[in-house]
Amino acid sequence: MNNGADKRLNRGAEEDEDDEDDGDGLEAWERTYADERSWESLQEDELGFLRPIDNKAIYHAQYRRRLRSLSSSAAATRIQKGLIRYLYIVIDLSRAAAETDFRPNRMVVVAKHVEAFIREFFDQNPLSQIGLVTIKDGVAHCLTDLGGTPEAHIKALMGKLECSGDSSLQNALDLVHGYLNQIPSYGHREVLILYSALSTCDPGDIMETVQKCKKSKIRCSVIGLAAEMFICKHLCQETGGMYSVALDEAHFKELILEHAPPPPAIAEFAIANLIKMGFPQRAAEGSISICSCHKEAKVGAGYTCPRCKARVCELPTECRICGLTLVSSPHLARSYHHLFPIPPFDEVPLSRPNDPNQKAKRNCFGCQSLLSPGNKPGLSVACPKCQQHFCLDCDIYIHESLHNCPGCESLRNSKSVIANET
Amino acid sequence: MVQFANVIVYSYQYLLDPKVAGIISKELPKESVVVFDEAHNIDNVCIEALSVSVRRQTLEGATRNLNRISQEIDRFKATDAGRLRAEYNRLIEGLALRGNLPTTDIWLANPALPDDILKEAVPGNIRRAEHFLHVLRRLVQYLRGRLETENVEKESPVGFLVSINNHAGIDQKTLKFCYDRLHSLMLTLEITDTDEFLHIQTICDFATLIGTYARGFSIIIEPFDERMPHIPDPVLQLCCHDASLAIKPVFDRFQSVVITSGTLSPIDLYPRLLNFHPVVSRSFTMSLTRDCICPMVLTRGSDQLPVSTKFDMRSDPGVVRNYGKLLLELVSVVPDGIVCFFVSYSYMDGIINAWNDHGILKDIMQHKLVFIETQDVVETTLALDNYRRACDCGRGAVFFSVARGKVAEGIDFDRHYGRLVIMFGVPFQYTLSKILLARLEYLRDNFQIKEGDFLTFDALRQAAQCVGRVIRSKADYGMMIFADKRYIFPNSFSITLTSKILNSLIKG
């Protein structure tokens, strides 16, 4: 990159963004294409045909690194997690959100990923609720109240995408603090702030607000899009949240999805409580009743609250009449796997081609595909409990979506089944 | 207390300045290890320890002191003449102080260095107290006459001595013993409020230094400060040019002396300036686990015009605008605190006014608050305090400071207080100052160091020190920008940039 070096010496730098300096010798504009120059990674084999790009191994290594970091703290012990989460997402719509370093601009990228996050969040935490807050012109507005249906939030967000003015962290925290103080004590209070600005214009002392949030046990996390700010770091440290700064769009997506699984519960807060919940029956097909969420008569296809017999359209939700949390058993089952996570699979050492003890052809227990096609030794993993081998795709699928190991589940031995549950 | 401690930490003056060292450091054993930390300015400290400046107020104060002393002498003559006579006898016997000379190292509180004090009897013409006072009065009168000059004068100590002898009739030996004699007299007269007598002590320091040293000094008399020619402010300065004089006793006396600093480049210049042969001379590069500093040199603005604080380019509106635009762009992308260093107070005032007229300052203030260092200590402390508060609470702030000011010497801007430091220009010293010119001449004649080289070395040392305020630990990170086209042109001292900064430049 001699041209680049010369240009830099003679011209000097006009601007440089701290977080995006990877020191590779690439100019700023070149870096934006660094990941997308897929034509450069094409290879030809001996006959001149294009070899398919093998990025599976890279992807798998990435995945395992992430898994290891997530479970390293929880490796041996089971950590109590907050399953009933009341999360406020604070979106910064100040003038900094119109910056075009994320394409087309920060606001659109944030909205897109927040939508994906909301869906993923409700997928993993069916008992929890989300609310949306925006910061615009130095004032924080509550976009949607705490609720359990993703569609309402997404529709409200997409309708209100304009940005202007300053950003005020303290106003947002005050607003969220006011709302979160009203929720019952068994719920975990969380705030996720997506901050695009580099500074905050506050009406008062923000340190006091941080202490207030800490006392109310609100766990604040921040994802920054610009650069690391001291006040955000301080806020996250005090309240026990996570602060990260996104380098580019893919990284931002990774960071925001990290907040979907439930975080560890704060020690003094995690007192065991009995929570009243209702498991409503589905109403008969032809029954007519007035729906409590739409306030109009509807035919069939609803659920009846067991306590007050009001009709609700979908689950999980909170009954509008009597305030009972209404869930169905699959929702609870989906939350169960957070408490008993699958241990990461061990990597199987690559088999040597002329090793006589090695079984010649092995199939993946999950999808029955050959584990070492051709002469190439393939990467595979094995479950430490049932010793079954799986291919990389099945490994990722089992850990991310299925949350159950097929090998362990299919063991008929009752001892192993009990061992799995303890 | 000094005798009982294993580790002593104090400032350089306590060891280098002979006046203070005699009181504080005389008990230190020879086997001590002396470490000078942050010693990049050690040559300046040595020089200042041996320099004296005399103004009209000093002379008037000295006259007052002399009157007071003569009153005291008359009082003593009336009541206790025996004491004065005993002192006289002692002086005849050659004991300069009351009591014996210490049998361990001779480290007297004399402005001249111990080896240079002759251990002989005080000369006859100042043994009697009244004669001594007459001598001092004649000296003060002569100095007053010299201060009335209209032109700038520069003389060597020898020439000055000759003219003192001609006009005031005081010879060199007499001058040499002025300090001791005064000290002894004040002890005899039991004068306790020594603060009042600082002026006459300054004159005696001056006299003793002139009498003792023939080379390495010059005397410069200026009728007014060059930058304000209408205000008469005559000053007579005895400038020491040779930094090795003050540090020589330290080298001679102590077994191991270590000079260390983070910005000691080029390292071979210091042994020449301080006149010693280093036994071990090492440079250590700092190992960083990740790229945490980003030094950059900026030679042109965004409209491709070269930028500099060279004297003839200072008022160029293009340069001013380019600097302003640079700061504005950076303010919108750098979080928390930014520190900017300018080459002088007057330059900083001028450029900030120009930015205000263009509206650039208002745009900067939209992103971050602005704080400025002034020459007043209280104001600067307040500004610094509020700057830190602004950085803490997320509002963000910019601090404008001067490269040779108090802030650059002492205040750290670590972590979020300094995420970016911009050095606007190259901080050369005021090159028309007579003292600096005299010193450069001395260095050229005696050490074969070219003036340009020394000035560049000094400026880059100051720039590196300013810029080093930002990184204080390995976990810290920050950006440094040197904004001047003169940073790029290689000269013999292009490697005077700190080695760690240079390593990063090469890597990046």
Image: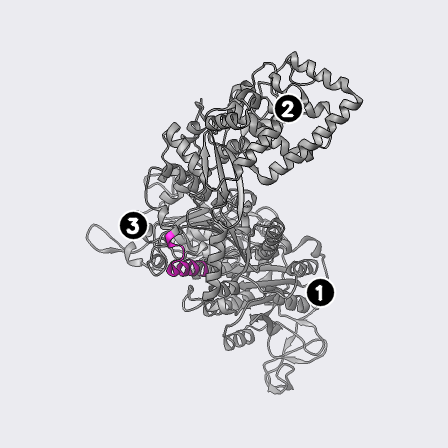
Kindly identify which chain the residue marked by label 2 belongs to.
Answer: B
Left or right, B508 with reference to A415: left
Q: Which mark is residue A275?
A: 1
At x 65%, y 26%, the residue is B133
Q: Which residue is mark 2?
A: B132
Do tags 2 and 3 sit on the same chain?
Answer: no
Q: Position of residue B430 (x, y in %)?
A: 45, 44
For residue B117, above or below residue B447: above
* Number of marks present in the image shown: 3
| Distance in Å between CA atoms under marks 3 and 1 | 68 Å
Left or right, A202 with reference to B358: right
Do tags 2 and 1 sit on the same chain?
Answer: no
| Distance in Å between CA atoms under marks 2 and 1 | 99 Å
Foreground pick, B342 / A86? B342
Task: Classify the position of the N terminus of chain B by image quarter.
Answer: top right
Q: Name the secondary structure under disc 1.
A: loop
Q: Of tags 2 and 3, which is closer to the observer?
A: 2
- Three-letter code for the amino acid on which mark 3 is drawn: Asp
* Dot 2 alpha-carbon crowd within 10 angstroms: few under 14, some 14 to 19, many 20 or more: some
Q: Position of residue A237 (x, y in %)?
A: 61, 53
Which region is colored magenta? Answer: B312-328
Kindly identify which chain the residue marked by label 1 belongs to.
Answer: A
Left or right, B251 with reference to A53: right
